[in-house]
Image (cartoon, grey):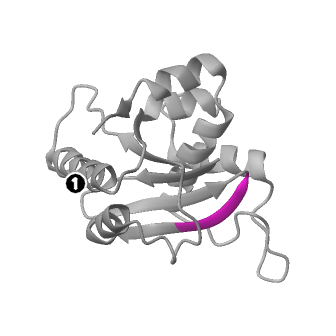
Amino acid sequence: MTIFAIDPGPTTCGAALLSWGDVLGTSKAASVGVLCELLSTRDWSSWRQTPDVVLIERVQSYGQAGRHLLETSESVGRLLQAALSGGHRVVLVPRRLVCMALDVSGAGKDAQVAEACRAILGPKGTKANPGPTYGVTSHGWQALGLALAYREAAPSVRAEMDSGEVKA
């Protein structure tokens, strides 16, 4: 299964493409506009492979709403619409399910998600001896964590994730 995962932000997003355990590409700051273009046109030549599913981290406020959260939710809407218009299967996954699947406790801090990714895929590596996650940084870890959580989730958690599938 090939998974394209997006960690949304107000103007830029983390993105990762995972295929059967191989990290095919990540981006720490893909613009929302560029991702919308990619998702709607289905030209995946720059990412090397068309995904079977597009995962977008669902925004949740937990009682706090601010400008960043609202703008991020607008980005999620744009990405969702573009992916649906491109004919993709799209699943919105809340962060709590990502943390549950990766066995990240507490507030689900970004560093813990990155650590869980390395525990699954192996060490990051160096330029001379790159590992499977060499070059992944910043929001790219969160997108990769989303993809790995979906792939690694226990059946009950995966079923809850799949309940976030959006139909066109």
Horizontal and vertical percent position of residue 137: 56, 66
Label 1 residue SS: helix
Q: Please indicate whether residue 133 sits to the left or right of residue 161 in the image.
A: right
Name the residue rendered at 64%, 20% in the picture. Answer: 155
Horizontal and vertical percent position of residue 15: 47, 60
| Residue 34 image-quadrant placement | bottom left
Compared to residue 15, the image places residue 146 above or below, namely above
Could you say which is closer to the camera, residue 110 or residue 59? 59
Residue at which label 1 appears = 78
Compared to residue 142, the image places residue 13 above or below, namely below
Horizontal and vertical percent position of residue 20: 72, 51
Name the residue rendered at 26%, 32% in the picture. Answer: 61
Residue 9 seen in render: no
For the stretch drawn in magenta, what is the main secondary structure? strand
Question: Which stretch is magenta?
Answer: 21-26
Name the residue rendered at 53%, 61% in the picture. Answer: 50
What crowding class fits label 1: few (fewer than 14 Cα within 10 Å), some (14-19), or many (20 or more)? some
Q: Please indicate whether residue 116 sits to the left or right of residue 30 in the image.
A: right
Residue type, numbered disc 1: Arg
Q: Residue furthest bottom?
A: 128
Q: Residue furthest right?
A: 129
Name the residue rendered at 48%, 70% in the picture. Answer: 44
Horizontal and vertical percent position of residue 125: 79, 69
Could you say which is closer to the camera, residue 163 or residue 12? 163
Q: Considering the image in quadrants, where does the C terminus appear?
A: top left
The question of residue 150 being in magenta is answered with no
Q: Please indicate whether residue 53 sits to the left or right of residue 155 in the image.
A: left
Q: Residue furthest top?
A: 156
Residue 126 seen in render: yes
| Residue 36 image-quadrant placement | bottom left
